[in-house]
Image: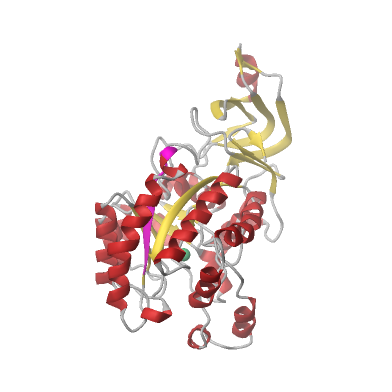
Amino acid sequence: MIEADLILYNTSQVHTCASQGKPKKGKSMSDTGAIEQGAIAIKEGLILEVAPQSEILKRYGSSKKLDVGGMAVCPGFIDPHTHIVFAGNRINEFEQRVSGSTYLEIMAAGGGIMSTARAVREASVQDLVEQSLPRMQKMTEYGMTTIEIKTGYGLDLPSEMKMLQAIEQLAALSPLTILPTFLGAHAFPTELKAEPETYVNLVVMEMLPQAMEWFKGSSFFQKGLPFFCDVFCEQNAFNLEQSTRILTEAKKIGYKIKIHSDEFTSLGGIGLGIDLGATSVDHLDVATVDDQKRLSMSETVGVLLPGVNFNLGSTHFADGRGMIDRGCAIALSTDINPGSCPSPSIPLMMAIASRYQKLTPAEALNACTINAAFAVGVGKMCGSLEKGKLADLVVLNQPDHRYLSYEFGSNPVKYVLKKGNLI
Ligand SMILES: [Zn+2]
């Protein structure tokens, strides 16, 4: 008998979301790799084996056993797209919006991303950490075990570096796996609105190299984690030419690539991302059928953020159903941020995606686990319950995983385990 640190047993089903080392595309997204009455043996934070309980209890012994009371178990959730580090809030703007002001009117009055940027510029690293940590804790309560975090509210060199430092401190304070992304090209700062090329030069010539230098001295680099560069490719943000210049330079100096594309207008950002071998292309609300087909033939994961459409009161959503039917690998994310989606709940995103993007509960589960892991370049390390992967998992408070999409507004998560430890 092999000695394990922990055996988790008495499940209804274990949904492994196993994927043979690649993201799930098309039809395979409807397979959750369910093992009826499965059990899991864990040692040193890693999964030894997932199999039917009768086999696990025959092969493994442990002084520590976790009886989950007949509930369903799935991999810990992974959020591949967040703006969780920020200062202040945009509650006033939200109220103005529901009272009839348009997003453009609010922007013209100094609101939007720039109002958060002002608050971030005034905040210390410590302020950012103190304000962001409770948001991460809330995400954890909803089953999150890995989170990507973007900069992009500094929009000048010192403030963007401050955001990177805050992300590293958050990673040190939390048991979660954190992945950093440099998003200096999130918006043009007010002071350079009239000189966009000056800001692009600043991003390319100063911010990208300095952020990479920071990364190489960071704990993320020591752990072998990737570092991403992201750009908001959109009308009134960065056009295709500017996005191409920034991301091409970023790739040259060692960044992995992500792109915010096709949220409101289709400028060609999806094709750019695919051509550069992007890890993910995100939003895709107005992605053309041609771009969806190209995405299906690439290694790039499409990340959908349906909480944004919901929060903005829109009835238009990215064509998740069409993308899966065309063979794309799709992931879901909260996009948690103070303006367009102030929600820490990934199960809520599954519920919205099922209703408005017609993802089945099984597709939504794979989209928040294994495909989300590949959307942040850690699909070989986590995202599914397979031998040798991190023992990051969620015990639901229901015996059926479909409750994740079916019920909404409540928290369906009973326990969260990170590297085999209850958190
Ligand atoms: Zn975003």
**Image coordinates for residue 397, horizontal then vertical, percent:** 72, 45
The residue under the point 37% across, 45% down is 216
Depth check: give the residue in front, 148 or 117: 117
Picture quarter with the C terminus: top right
**In x, y percent, where is residue 254?**
29, 49
Where is 237 relative to 370, above or below? below
Asked whether the viewer can see residue 421, the reply is yes
Coloring scheme used: secondary structure
Q: Position of residue 99 (x, y in %)?
A: 63, 87
Magenta stretch holds residue 225: yes
Q: Which residues are magenta?
A: 222-232
Image-based side of 388 in relation to 200, left or right: right
Q: Quadrant of residue 421?
A: top right
Quarter of the figure with residue 330: bottom left
- What residue appears at the point 68 percent right and 28 percent down from the top-left corner? 9
Left or right, 154 with reference to 84:
left
From this viewpoint, is residue 279 visible? no
Residue depicted at x 63% and y 49%: 140
